[in-house]
Amino acid sequence: MPSQRLLYLSGVSPFRRPKGTSSHTDGITVNKTTQTVESAAVGGVFHIEDVYPLIDGGRFPVKRIAGERVEVWADIYRDGHDVVSAALVWRRERDREWRREPMTHHSNDRWGGSFVPDQPGRYVYALEAWTDEFATWRRGFELKQKAGADVTLDAIEGAGMLTKALAGGQAATTVILKRCEDFLQTGEPAPLLSDELKHAMAVSQPRPDLTRSRLFPLMADRPRARNGAWYEMVPRSQAKTPGQHGTFRDCIARLPDIAGMGFDVVYLTPIHPIGRTNRKGRNNAVTAAEGDPGSPYAIGSSEGGHDAVHPELGTLQDFRDFIAACKQHEMEVALDFAVQCAPDHPWLKQHPQWFRRRPDGSMRYAENPPKKYEDIVNPDFSSEDAGALWNALRDVVLFWIDQGVNIFRVDNPHTKPFRFWEWLIHEIQIRHPDTIFLAEAFTRPKLMKGLAKLGFTQSYTYFTWRTHKWELEQYLIELTAYPERDFYRPNFFVNTPDILPFHLQTGETWMFKSRVALAATLSSTYGIYNGFELLEHEPIPGREEYLDSEKYEIKVRDWDKPGNIKPYIRDLNRVRRENAALQQISNLRFVPIDDGNVTGFVKESVDQTNSVAVAIALSSDVHEFWFPLGDFQVGPTGDRRHVAAVENLITGERYPVEWGGIRLRIDPARDPALLFRCLA
Amino acid sequence: MPSQRLLYLSGVSPFRRPKGTSSHTDGITVNKTTQTVESAAVGGVFHIEDVYPLIDGGRFPVKRIAGERVEVWADIYRDGHDVVSAALVWRRERDREWRREPMTHHSNDRWGGSFVPDQPGRYVYALEAWTDEFATWRRGFELKQKAGADVTLDAIEGAGMLTKALAGGQAATTVILKRCEDFLQTGEPAPLLSDELKHAMAVSQPRPDLTRSRLFPLMADRPRARNGAWYEMVPRSQAKTPGQHGTFRDCIARLPDIAGMGFDVVYLTPIHPIGRTNRKGRNNAVTAAEGDPGSPYAIGSSEGGHDAVHPELGTLQDFRDFIAACKQHEMEVALDFAVQCAPDHPWLKQHPQWFRRRPDGSMRYAENPPKKYEDIVNPDFSSEDAGALWNALRDVVLFWIDQGVNIFRVDNPHTKPFRFWEWLIHEIQIRHPDTIFLAEAFTRPKLMKGLAKLGFTQSYTYFTWRTHKWELEQYLIELTAYPERDFYRPNFFVNTPDILPFHLQTGETWMFKSRVALAATLSSTYGIYNGFELLEHEPIPGREEYLDSEKYEIKVRDWDKPGNIKPYIRDLNRVRRENAALQQISNLRFVPIDDGNVTGFVKESVDQTNSVAVAIALSSDVHEFWFPLGDFQVGPTGDRRHVAAVENLITGERYPVEWGGIRLRIDPARDPALLFRCLA
């Protein structure tokens, strides 16, 4: 459309201004290179407002899953009463060509449209609105004609519009020329009023007042970003002989067990060489004893840094073999990305300018006064050479991607600059849109949300400590409400190497089962840290930390220890895989259960073919309660029906739904959770 | 602060990038002059989010009253645990110098601050955040000292920070030098920990990570923008002899009557020469009879256009005399600004390119198919010469401002381009910040709100047709909620020359009183169109329009006609003037009245010295009901007390509040409204 001029809401004037016409910024000092008074910008013909979905006015990308439809809504209006058209335009961020979907007016100037980002990646979308001048003419013509007015001139005006049509392709042009000719030959307006011409003109006529909104970002992730069961393990603890350092070969030997439990992601704590200088001893002792392996988070030694493998684990090829073995078991590998360095990390010699020293020339170790972490130094993100540091860290991630890793669990991202993460994640995802970043930030709510907004695919949560019904439900409602649900993807870990919550410290089977059932059904992504399945629960007294933490020593476990809940976890993961409803989180809807220690909820899959109802006990006593299903319908749109029966997803038993619900009984000693499929 | 570098949220990289460092836009096609992928912009060190107040993310200005404090809130956070400082910076849009107010952290990373825009005008404000590095050092130092650690190096580091302090003025520099010297002489850290030094460093140290939000616009209006009683009149109908064309002298003679009723603004329908071509006759007849005066909205004739005065009204000097006379009565004049032209408006000859013609060369009259308005042509805002039209229209407004007019009621703004109004209002208000624009748009909700957002000071409303309790309360709650209350200032007209609503057509006194009491107390700005006080109510049968509308003929009325409600209006306006609580609208709080035909509410003034309770009957029967005041407190912050008594603002009678409320009786035949002052 050669005559089409794009107008931007905060953009240029809609027509050529004659000389001597002052613009709105007349007399106002505005430095265009640094800041503009945005409010005063003369907008386009249309107001495009209240756009959905949107994170912080479009500052941050909305997160969705590739292949799923994205609905977009906006208020779109202009002055007067002309016929308005609108379109949703979208493209991958790196592409030049826009794709285009029509938008439909619903009511009260609210318009809707949708598109499907088919591949994972960064997208942008925008809204366009323009006046359909021919349709406006036609509507007026028909009203006048109906009122018996003389429409001779109006017909000529309508025909005149045909001559200005310039785009729209061959078919439309043919229609327009034909109707124009028909009118000229007969003088009768009928040819101008055909629907065929209306459509041809809708795509062909100039759009001089086309207004485009600003661009809104969207990240379409692969499904694993939203759905997955994670198994965290410390690779050096996977040997079978006490005192022996585990290897990637030992890890490979463990995979059938992990895959047997139904996990999707095997997440390894850092696999890099561990520093020797100021190495920590067992239970975080300030000095290490002979043979103590040190913390894997003290990264780097003379044997290499972030792009090296700890020699005792094996070679880089062994690691690649491990990835391949995981793949055979249909599992992925997640690596830990921890930015800190041990004092003997190669970077301290290669790039001394990245590290700060004290007035006496000594190294500045990490600290959180009065605590000191002498086995770690943090690179200085504000050094004059930090640009090179940013690039080096990006190259570390690219290196592991080259080895086949697509998931990174990022250690303590909240203590590094936000703009670094925003840059890093963008740098990686424009090259490798499959890459998933999990933010391990246990900190203040706004910071955790801020990291999610700026690009982290998933985030750790407060779930680990939430045990009461009210706080669980309140927290889940917060996470699944808009806009949180569009940027914050929770990964519910029941425990971590750093966190043994108080409620697990008594080691009761029902509580371990209840916690893993909550994590696995409330959230579509969850994780356990190994040992959980064995009910490990010995704390440092009075603290929510493991005694004899394997962060500082090598463990060897009996993975088939009596009393383990591996079959229970296997069942949960099977149910998750078989029920698409559980592969989402924002579809969560709590139901009112008249028992303060039972939480109940329903979930339905995007395609409406699968609906699941869940009840989980939060205390050890036997619960009998009513599970209302009366206001819940299932099945495809147009044929929604009330739930007629439920089927127990573990036992296969079916129960009819009568009087709008079902009476349930939970004995946590047997199973604290009931999982049902809802049947129409 | 020479070393201070301002970082913008959507701005530049925080440090110099070394060569070869790719930026985040690497490989993405971005045309900087037209659009940027804003989401991908690397931000500053701080996230500054969820700013209050804000209209559409800062696209449109917040409206407030000059002299009143503006509270600003935002989430402000950065990575890590350093001590953060924040400031609110603000200035008039045209000024270069920022003014600065400290912000305070409340909880959960929420910060607050405030400023007072002292003069009417356009302002911008922004939020700044930076790390207080010295305070961070001091906090760590004290924690280490308390833990008994060796702090020798820490003290040297703290002292080293003193040498980098560069700004803050003489006093701060003196303190810093002194403390530095004390430390160097003694080696003791105590001088570094003095509060005096803490404050000196807070203002003096570099702020390398200073992050500034984008700029947010605010319009501070004069008080009349929010509060005023309007009296609309047609100047040619102010003569005393039937058939005689009224003049500005006649209008002046009417002022004691209008001022006596307590009005603040006298609003005149257009005062310009009226076209002769296609002039409309009485009752909107297509052809005028001999002597018919035509509609004042058909502006322009050989005698002049928008900057001329209709000769039969008098001279421009007469109009200026009228303004002066209003001023003596402490009233202002509002003029009608109607963009359309009569076919004999001088612009049609001077600027033929501003008007569209039909294929046969004839003039294109205004139309809303199938309706035609042959006495009017609309200038074409999309003509190639429209820039000159914009300027000419601006100059019309400037012309009347030069004559002393500061209030413009704009006719049908929703049928002209939004960007024109946004430009025009800005153009005028940067020169004359006292100017008030009232949007006469009776159209769809989004358009009415859109016009308010883009700059109209006040707006007409649906109040004119809202009669039921539920719809009145729902509408008022909508208008007084955030963000509407920060951009939409309602002007409640009970009638207009175009609208005689059905509920007034029976002419019942109680209904006229109820309507004007509702308008005058619910809204701080309201208006009547003359004749209302005389209970004029003759409609065109079946329509909400006046029969024999004075839009098309000259009227002469007996302004003291028996049965008039002038004393009632006078009382209402006196109560409004005496009670600051009624000079606002967003302070409205409905109370639950157990009568479906009585609405009750309370209002309190900004300074908390005045509180008013109002009950108004919406039906003619006698009402007895309970007015609850139990959860309502009055008086200054820190000494708030429950309402102990109320005083009738008309009769002066006092009643004690007992059992948390008061029993009231309304006999609409006497007075449908009860107005009370609340006493502590």
Image: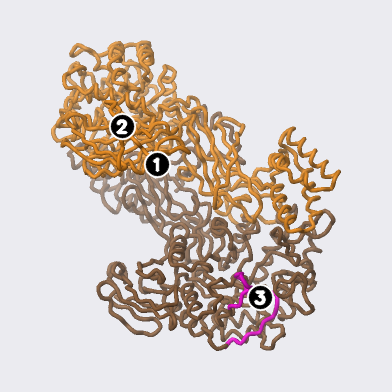
Chain colours: A orange, B brown
How many C-alpha atoms fall within 10 Å of the one at disc 1: few (<14), some, or many (≥20)?
Answer: some
Is A636 colored magenta in this rendering?
A: no
Alpha carbon separation for disc pair 1 and 3 = 56 Å
| Front residue of this view, candidates A643 and B163 | A643
The residue furthest right is: A185
When the figure is inspected, residue A65 is found, relative to residue B101, above or below; the finding is above
Q: Looking at the image, which residue is at 38% across and 26% down?
A: A408
x, y (%) of residue B35? 59, 40
Q: Name which quarter of the figure residue A28 lies in.
A: bottom right
Give whichever of discs 1 and 2 has the lower sequence position.
1
Residue position marked by numbered label 1 in the rendering: A484
Image-based side of A40 in relation to B66, left or right: right
Discs 2, 3 touching: Cβ within 8 Å: no
User: Could you tell me which quadrant the C terminus of chain B lies in?
Assistant: bottom left
Q: Tell me the magenta residue range.
A: B537-560
Q: What is the number of callouts on the image?
A: 3
Asked whether residue B218 is in view, the answer is yes
When the figure is inspected, residue A447 is found, relative to residue A531, above or below; the finding is below
Badge 2: chain ID: A
Q: Looking at the image, which residue is at 25% across and 32% down?
A: A673
Image-based side of A155 in relation to B537, left or right: right
| Front residue of this view, candidates B293 and B640 | B293
- Residue type at mark 1 is Glu
x, y (%) of residue A363? 30, 29
Discs 1, 2 touching: Cβ within 8 Å: no
Residue position marked by numbered label 3 in the rendering: B549
Image-based side of A52 in relation to B137, left or right: right
| Front residue of this view, candidates B312 and B16 | B312
- Residue type at mark 3 is Ser
Alpha carbon separation for disc pair 2 and 3 = 71 Å
> For residue B149, which numbered disc appears in the image?
none
